[in-house]
Image (spheres, grey):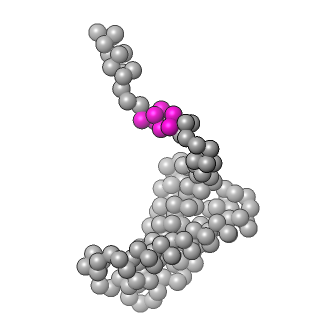
Amino acid sequence: MMKSYSHRKKSKINLKRKLIKQVEESPSWVKSLLGHFEVPSMDVVSKRFALFGFIAGWSIATSAETGPTFQLALALVSCIYFLNDKMKNLARASATGLGLFAGGWIVGSLVVPVIPAFVFPRTWCLELLTSLVAYVFLFLGCTLVK
């Protein structure tokens, strides 16, 4: 009985081992690209998710009154702070943060107009939706980039 159990356990697909094997067999440029990213602990991810979620909620709540300019600036400064904490280089962290912000804003500006208008509430303007995309880019960047 133990023999059949150990055989089933060994034949079970181990996704983590399979992914590690694929990364080890991948070309050098893929290894180099993956070397720029890391997955931090769930505590760090949840705290940053809560911060950027709060900023996004704040932008949505005040979207009818003002634009999300202050919230975008706060998200950018937060991202640069987190990146500087990891990189220990303020110039590199600032350049990375500004690049993430610009990338998020450009992708948001291209993707949001394509989404049908009935998907979002009427009070959500193009600027708000684009800023939400930028928040996602800033969150992912400051969380995953080494």
Q: Position of residue 25 (x, y in %)?
A: 55, 36
Looking at the image, residue 5 lies above or below residue 45 = above
Q: Quadrant of the N terminus?
A: top left
> Would residue 117 be seen by someone viewing this image from the given angle?
yes
The part of the chain drawn in magenta is 15-22
Q: Quadrant of the C terminus?
A: bottom right
Find out whether residue 18 is within the magenta segment.
yes
Q: Position of residue 123 (x, y in %)?
A: 33, 85
The image quadrant of residue 111 is bottom left
Magenta segment, prevailing SS (helix, strand or loop): helix
Left/right placement of residue 104 relative to residue 65 reads: right
Q: Could you tell me which residue is drawn at 40 percent across and 83 percent down?
A: 126
Furthest residue in direction left, as rendered? 118
The image quadrant of residue 84 is bottom right
Q: Position of residue 136 (x, y in %)?
A: 47, 66
Q: Could you tell me which residue is drawn at 38 percent across and 85 percent down?
A: 125
Looking at the image, residue 64 lies above or below residue 56 = below
Question: As rendered, which of 69 and 13 lies closer to the eye?
Answer: 13
Question: As rendered, which of 63 and 5 lies closer to the eye?
Answer: 5
Furthest residue in direction front, as rendered? 27
Find out whether residue 50 is within the magenta segment.
no
> Would residue 35 be seen by someone viewing this image from the given angle?
no
Q: Could you tell me which residue is drawn at 68 percent across and 69 percent down?
A: 94
Furthest residue in direction bottom, as rendered? 65
Left/right placement of residue 19 relative to residue 99 reads: left
The image quadrant of residue 73 is bottom right
Q: Could you tell me which residue is drawn at 33 percent across and 20 percent down?
A: 8
